[in-house]
Image (spheres, rainbow, N blue to C red):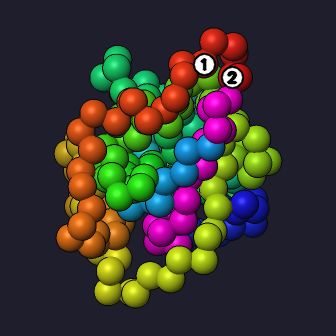
């Protein structure tokens, strides 16, 4: 399990090193694990694409720390988005998880990812370093440096110059991986309790 110290580093460093690690979800019926393929970094109040650029609010409070906490929000009224908070307490930054690979299936897109893993806003402010319900693991996979590519972030044209930052990091996939369009089926039974 990745400890809090892993996430307390500079966001871009954490983002690059999070690719290739595993997101693990205990859904009550067993464990689901996916190798992280793509993430986006959002760095501080000056980053106009970061939710904290509009100030400290009830919604964005979690972004100010501690590191290793989940920031889950609803996008376009329909997509739950999972982020992990980074940096030191008091500095708002996070990494959005955009794609994972599960058993050779590519779950591509942050909304598809959360549906597949049964993640919603009930896990907002969840401690991702505690090893309960949702966490990250390093399973020792080594990545050649050339396999990690940087791109501009998606859907942040409103952020002006900040939209041009190459802060989306993606692992170049092997040819055998299949893309998973409808991914909710792997989540297992729907949770009935507050976080079961």
User: Which residue: 72% across, 60% down?
Assistant: 1
**Horizontal placement of 48 versus 177: left or right?**
right
Segment tinted magenta in the rendering: 15-30
Mark 2 or 1, which is nearer the eye?
1
The answer to whether residue 30 shows anywhere in this view is yes
Q: Where residue 34 sits in the image (x, y, percent)?
A: 49, 53
Camera-side residue: 40 or 195? 195
Disc 1: CA contacts within 10 A as few (<14), some (14-19) or many (>=20): some
Camera-side residue: 140 or 136? 140
The answer to whether residue 62 shows anywhere in this view is no
Q: Is residue 20 magenta?
A: yes
Q: Where residue 100 sits in the image (x, y, percent)?
A: 41, 53
Look at the image and tell me in which quarter the C terminus lies: top right
For label 1, the SS is: loop
Q: Which residue is mark 1?
A: 191
Q: Pointers 2 and 1 in contact (CB under 8 A)?
A: yes
**Horizontal placement of 195 versus 50: left or right?**
right
């Amino acid at each position: 399990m990745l400890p809090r110290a892993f996430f307390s580093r500079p966001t871009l460093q954490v983002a690059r090193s999070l690719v290739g690690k595993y997101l693990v979800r205990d859904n009550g019926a067993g464990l689901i694990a996916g190798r992280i393929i793509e993430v986006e970094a959002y760095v501080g109040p000056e980053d106009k694409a970061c939710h904290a650029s509009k100030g400290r609010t009830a919604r964005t409070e979690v972004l100010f720390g501690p590191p290793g906490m989940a920031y889950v929000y609803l996008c376009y009224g329909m997509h739950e988005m999972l982020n992990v908070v980074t940096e030191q307490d008091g500095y708002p930054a996070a990494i959005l998880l955009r794609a994972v690979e599960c058993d050779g299936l590519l779950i591509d897109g942050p909304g598809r990812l959360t549906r597949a893993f049964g993640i919603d806003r009930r896990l907002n402010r969840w401690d991702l370093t505690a090893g309960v319900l949702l966490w990250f693991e390093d399973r020792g996979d080594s990545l050649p440096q050339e396999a990690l590519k940087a791109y501009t972030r998606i859907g942040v044209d409103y952020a002006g110059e900040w939209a041009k930052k190459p802060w989306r990091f993606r692992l170049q996939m092997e040819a055998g991986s299949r893309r998973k369009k409808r991914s909710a089926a792997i989540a297992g039974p729907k949770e009935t309790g507050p976080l079961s």
